[in-house]
Image (cartoon, helix red, strand yellow):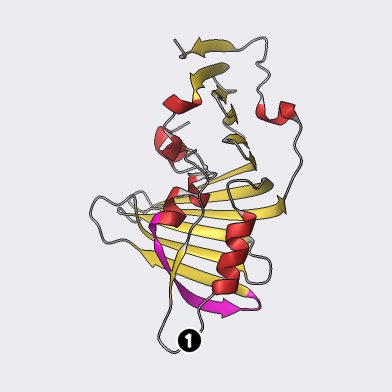
Amino acid sequence: MNRYIVRHYLIPIIGGMVFMPFIFSISFAQAEGTAGPESLLSLIRKNYSPESSLSAQFSLTLFWSVREKQEKKRGSIALAAGNRFRIETDGETWVSDGSTFWDYTPASKQVAIKRLADVDRSSLPSQIFTRYLTEFHFQEADKHNGLVELTAKDDAADAAYASIQLWAQEQTGRIDRCRMTDQSGNTFTYVFSGTRFGRNFSRETFEFAIPKSARIVDMRN
């Protein structure tokens, strides 16, 4: 899989898809004379707090501006307290039990094993729910049929993304969609579905059963 694509997967999740501590403190700018989305912020913080668990399916549409080419990916994500996660796509699987990290690529039949502490978590989907949402200052741009659009921009030359658009359900605090635009004009649009909060996962969810035919690259030494 193209490493650039992998870097923009969660990301945060389970970002910081990932995984940095799952802190979710979004800062919203409030226009003068208007009511700020404090209730929505409270819901989002509750739903995506470090101690919460969740699962969701996602689709990712990547548009490369220079090549004017579009790619699509689909996958699922499971998150739990203690830096535990499982992210699966058609081309790769990432799993963490909180201390060990597995990266499996079916096409090459290879699984890389690392200490989670040694992993560049910015490459994981959970980043969406951690680093990028905590670093940006969001403004409410629109509200329609209970769906609130939040936008943020970063003009710094070294910023990973020039802008982020986020759509969340006002009543439930559920994130439905996120569009991230990098400095080159490439866009990464996530659409989340089937999101469930407070999931009780089995221990096996955050462990990886290595296929017998897989080549193991153990990088923990």
Label 1: state its secondary structure: loop
Q: Where does residue 16 sit, x and y in percent of width and height?
A: 47, 44
Say if residue 188 shows up in the picture: yes
Callout 1 amino acid: Thr
Q: Residue at x 56, y 10 (%)?
A: 215
Quarter in which the C terminus is drawn = top left
* Mark 1 nearby-residue class (10 Å; few <14, some 14–19, many ≥20): few
The magenta segment is 135-146
**Residue 53 picture quarter:** top right
Residue 203, image quadrant = top right
Q: Where residue 201 sits: x, y (%)? A: 75, 37
Chief secondary structure of the magenta span? strand
- Which residue is situated farthest in the left direction here? 157
Front residue of this view, candidates 207 and 88: 207
Residue holding disc 1: 34
Asked if 12 appears above or below 171 in the picture, the reply is above
